[in-house]
Amino acid sequence: MLNIQDPTEARKIIRNNQYDKQTAGTADQYVQGNVCILPSKYSADFETFCQKNPKPCPLIGLGYKGDPKLKNLGDIDIRTDIPKYRVWEKGEIVDEPLDIKKYWNEDLVTFILGCSMSFELPLIEAGIEIQHIKNNTTVPMYRTSIDCKPAGQFQGKMVVSMRPLSTKDTIKSIQICSKFPSVHGAPIHFGNPEEI
């Protein structure tokens, strides 16, 4: 785990290729985001998809076409400031580099989606144990049977993160997470995961 609370310092370490793992627990008093970078011809449809599906795709940042900097979110260079990238072509992962400088071009648009890691500190402060942080693993994610609302060519099933909790902690987590709608908010389901 990258146990650093200053996001600028964390990005500096990542930018220098000194860390390539998940960031749960890093700068945990700040909002974390998931990144999607697309050619501009898809950007309007993807933005509409996010607007139609704010629970799974809460849009918290949007870059300008061709600009790898996200100045309104801080000193961020989207080409270097993620621990590891997945480069997709025609539905397949073709590379997992530590930076995407060689892939960046003037036609790309960056989207930042709110991440559930953003509400983990309040859960921990409420006495709720977060298994993936305890075990230094990635938060478990699952594709549900719930359809997202389509926009243009974007469609699919909702993907959710899951945290195993007791009934008591589940109630607490609903109360806490509902205060964070820009990073998914309250759980969409609790109980038997097979129901979704």
Image: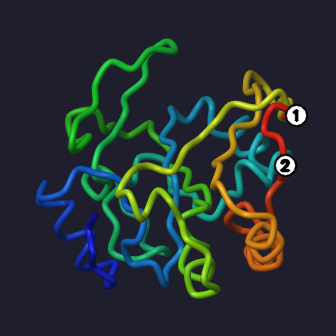
Give the colouring mode of the picture: rainbow
| Pointer 2 residue | 191
Q: Nearer the viewer, residue 110 or 1?
A: 1
**Quadrant location of the N terminus?**
bottom left
Give whichever of 46, 166 is nearer the camera.
166
Query: Vertical placement of 32 versus 78: above or below?
Result: below
Crowd rating for badge 1 (residues with CA inside 10 Å; few <14, some 14–19, many 20+)? few
In whole angstroms, how far apart are the C-alphas of marks 2 and 1?
Answer: 8 Å
Task: Kindly check if marks 2 and 1 are in contact, taking CB atoms under 8 A apart as contact.
Answer: yes
Determine whether, in the image, residue 4 is placed left or right of residue 196: left
> What residue is shown with label 1?
195
Answer with the quarter of the image where residue 3 lies.
bottom left
Question: Residue 67 appears at what percent x and percent y?
Answer: 39, 54
Where is residue 177? Give x, y as percent: 74, 72
- The residue that appears at 22% across and 44% down in the rendered structure is 99
Q: Is residue 123 above or below residue 86?
A: below
Is 109 placed above or below 80 here?
Answer: above
Residue at 74% x, 21% y is 153
The residue carrying pointer 2 sits among few (fewer than 14), some (14 to 19) or many (20 or more) residues within 10 Å by Cα, namely few
Amino acid type of the residue that numbered disc 2 sits on in the rendered structure = Gly
At 79% from the left edge and 58% from the top edge, which residue is drawn?
A: 187
Dot 2 lies on which element?
A: loop
In terms of depth relative to the viewer, which is nearer, 193 or 108?
A: 193
